Amino acid sequence: MKPKLEDVAKLAGVSKTTASRVLNNRGYLSDETLKKVHDAMETLNYQPNAAARQLFKRKTGLIGLIFPTVSNPFFGELVNYLEYELYQRDFKVIIGNSLHDINKETDYLNQLLAGQVDGLIVGTHNQGIEEYKYSHLPVVAIDRVVNSDIPIIESDNYKGGVLATQRLINAGVTRIIHTNGPSALETPTQRRREAYEAVMNEYGLEPHTFTIDFSLSFAEKKQRYNELFSIYPDMEALFVSNDVDASIIMTIANERGRKIPEDLLLVGYDGTDLMRNVIPELTTIIQPIENMAKIAVDVLVKRIEGIKTESEYILPVNLWEGKTSSR
Amino acid sequence: MKPKLEDVAKLAGVSKTTASRVLNNRGYLSDETLKKVHDAMETLNYQPNAAARQLFKRKTGLIGLIFPTVSNPFFGELVNYLEYELYQRDFKVIIGNSLHDINKETDYLNQLLAGQVDGLIVGTHNQGIEEYKYSHLPVVAIDRVVNSDIPIIESDNYKGGVLATQRLINAGVTRIIHTNGPSALETPTQRRREAYEAVMNEYGLEPHTFTIDFSLSFAEKKQRYNELFSIYPDMEALFVSNDVDASIIMTIANERGRKIPEDLLLVGYDGTDLMRNVIPELTTIIQPIENMAKIAVDVLVKRIEGIKTESEYILPVNLWEGKTSSR
């Protein structure tokens, strides 16, 4: 038998009126009460019916965006498009830069639970935040696996990895190194690594993935990439997980007297408008940032309105020719 | 005699209760009513007394940030720091990217008037928005002249212009071109131009400022900068108003076979963390973005609390050596 609101109230140890107020975000509710009721909904797998669907209808006109930092060009452009799309639908945008800050991400989720925002779009890397277990929340993830109930919007990371690796192999090199984030992070960007390793193996080449944390400072990254040059002194090519890091590698290669593309080939990732104009010579994989933003907003609005959506949206990528991946 | 709330109500044609509700942001108020009351406050130069100061006390915990676009590295880093500083003081941040969109900027101002945010930090270029006339509002401007009542936070643009121009003259060149936004825009960045022209004149050199709109697309900018190369075929050096545009000029120079620094010297502006790492070879003027954000938040919080502030804060700039401004 399907659980009712009474069952939720009973399990949470609150009155039905209080449970209803949580459902409808009415009046003051303590964090403790909110959590107890949401926990009970989760435990019982309570599905609000049509009447209760007003639960997450537009109440505040605010959507929270949680991304590592808008000072990175990929997230800067993504947030720019998301804000544009949401504004067209009469939503205003609250933004939280969550880099290094698991508490902040949790804080924004609690805002959502408390009805202070109508929905969230998250693209952060903090893991293990228990508030995400509330699968009925209007949350959409970009390039990040939160849980199986939260839809994910991503570009075709596997295809991007194939394009980049194949490109370098076609240029006639064999000692190709890949850089990516720690594999413990469950992000779809790990598929770039899987693709790189699969293509390398297919050609009988040995894959080497160099792990580096996205959240390091520029100075720390420079040190790590200098180590990379020392670990693989005879590398012929690099497939780097983002364009900003690729540009740091270009500087280090220059300092070490390794000419690009003569002595070292390079493919980046992301292909933001900014980076394609600042360093157009860098070969890169272009993610369809504008489209990712459009679809994320579409899917979020559907979730707010209680309409079912797909659980995963994979968008096509393209190769930007540049001049760093062939001689 | 100092005007009282009764006088405001009378002039606005509303009851004193309604005027008080506007003052205290209580209950539903139509846009029309809000404007009538705020207009009357402005006309009478009504200064809320200590008791009425709760007018703009923290009510929503939200601050609006209106900037052209976070996809530009300068604004991306600025918004990142502003959000960080505001979060430390328990404010959340609503962001609006106002490039090309005067209505959006007006819309956020009306949100402030309607008490949906506690304050605004603006760094946009849209001019002639009449809502800014309400001088009692908690608004702070960054790098922009709004009106004499709204405090402005800026870096020392005049000094930056002197540093850049002097640097190029010291390198032994005389045909130095400057690029900047339309001089009709009343932004402090015009002081870079004034400094450039003053230094050039001091040395008996002819200043040439090439005007280009910040809001153009990358493709349009490329076209304009190609025109620049055609208009001044014998230029020896460029002092460019921002680093992203300087990087576009580097690409065009390369396409036209003008080697930097051998055939052409270049100084940029802004010196964001990103651009100093992506193209470290570019000589530039570093704006103290983090400090600008800190002071903007300090000043805004004071204004919200009804504490008097300075009307202008000018922060020091630095030269980033790079390799494009000497041979």
Image (tube, coloured by chain):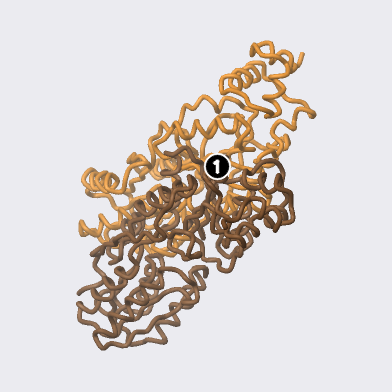
Chain colours: A brown, B orange
**In the displayed structure image, the side of residue A160 where residue B275 appears, left or right:** right
Q: Image point 59% across, 50% down: which residue?
A: A112
Residue A326 lies in what quarter of the image? bottom left
Any part of residue A159 in sight: yes
Query: In the picture, which quadrant includes the C terminus of chain B?
Result: bottom left
Q: Position of residue B39 (x, y in %)?
A: 60, 19
Query: In the picture, which quadrant includes the N terminus of chain B?
Result: top right
- Relative to A327, does residue A141 appear above or below in the rendering? above
Q: Image point 37% across, 65% down: which residue?
A: A243
Residue B133 lies in what quarter of the image? top right
- Relative to A15, does residue A36 appear above or below in the rendering? below
Q: Position of residue B55 (x, y in %)?
A: 71, 30
Numbered disc 1: what chain? A
Q: Inspect the image, locate mark 1, and give the three-letter code of the amino acid beneath it.
A: Ala
Q: Residues within 10 Å of mark 1 (few under 14, many from 20)?
A: few
Q: Position of residue B163 (x, y in %)?
A: 47, 51
Query: For mark 1, what is the residue?
Result: A51
- Relative to B94, does residue A67 appear above or below in the rendering? below
Q: Image point 33% across, 42% down: which residue?
A: B216
